[in-house]
């Protein structure tokens, strides 16, 4: 499963490095992260994608429902990506980091999805499918070995996994100056190792 936080940028996609001012609004009000995420989800649901098959990935911490929180400061990396699955088809992804605010990048994803739906309504479905076939040619993501991340041999018992996790978590926790990405990798490794341990 693709992670929602921190941002999972599609491997092989170039970054723009641009920070333009977005012009997306909700009526007369500036757009919020919550509103922009809702638009992305609605557009994908109109395309037949179940809400449970949608992951909006940013560097904004998540709410309990798994969507980014609106009440957070702008992160250094304001990019956004949306991953989704359509039953019986290859997974799809879109990402953008053009705008200076996360909510503007999410709104741009929603606007693009809306445009794609319009194309599909007017007979352009085959064109859309061809547009995404290039993703299958991208290199596979680097293999994630949870045992190596924790520095354990496969088959370690639950106690060893928890001890090693606590040791690494204390060292790499963001509150102690660690990188959020590394701390997330350690958490993910713990979950995967515990899943594989009876």
Image: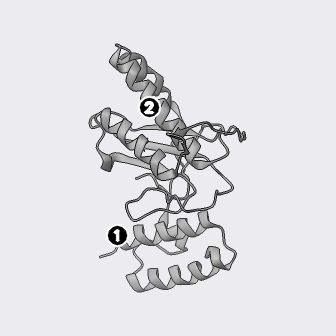
CA–CA distance in space, label 2 to label 1: 36 Å
Point 72% across, 41% down: residue? 17
Mark 2 neighbour class, 10 Å CA radius: few under 14, some 14 to 19, many 20 or more: many
CB within 8 Å, label 2 to label 1: no
Residue mark closest to the camera, 2 vs 1: 2
Point 64% across, 56% down: residue? 74
Residue 189 visible at all: yes
- Provide residue 49's location: percent of width, then percent of height: 31, 39
Q: Image check: 7 left or right of 83?
A: right
Point 42% across, 22% down: residue? 128
Query: Mark 1 or mark 2, which is nearer the start of the sequence?
Result: 2
Between 122 and 9, the residue placed more toward the observer is: 122
Residue 139 visible at all: no
Residue under label 1: 195
Q: Image check: 15 left or right of 166?
A: right
- The label number, if any, that marks residue 68 in the structure image: none
Whether 37 is drawn above or below 74: the answer is above
Point 53% across, 83% down: residue? 166
- Provide residue 90's location: percent of width, then percent of height: 37, 35
Residue under label 2: 113
């Amino acid at each position: 499963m693709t992670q929602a936080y921190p941002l999972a940028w599609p491997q092989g996609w170039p970054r723009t490095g641009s920070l333009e001012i977005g012009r997306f609004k909700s009526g007369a009000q500036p757009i919020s992260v919550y509103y922009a995420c809702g638009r992305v989800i609605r557009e994908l649901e109109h395309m037949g994608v179940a809400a449970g098959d949608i992951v909006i990935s940013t560097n904004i911490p998540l709410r309990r429902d798994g969507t980014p929180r609106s009440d957070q400061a702008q992160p250094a990396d304001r990019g956004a990506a949306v991953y989704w699955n359509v039953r019986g088809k290859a997974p799809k992804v879109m990402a953008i980091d053009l705008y200076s605010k996360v909510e503007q990048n999410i709104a741009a994803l929603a606007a693009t999805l809306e445009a794609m739906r319009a194309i599909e309504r007017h007979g352009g479905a085959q064109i859309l499918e061809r547009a995404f076939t290039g993703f299958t040619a991208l290199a596979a993501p680097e293999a994630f070995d949870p045992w190596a991340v924790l520095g354990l041999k496969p088959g370690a018992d639950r106690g060893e996994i928890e001890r090693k996790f606590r040791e690494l978590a204390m060292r790499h926790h963001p509150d102690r100056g660690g990188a959020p990405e590394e701390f997330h990798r350690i958490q993910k490794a713990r979950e995967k190792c515990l899943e594989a341990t009876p």
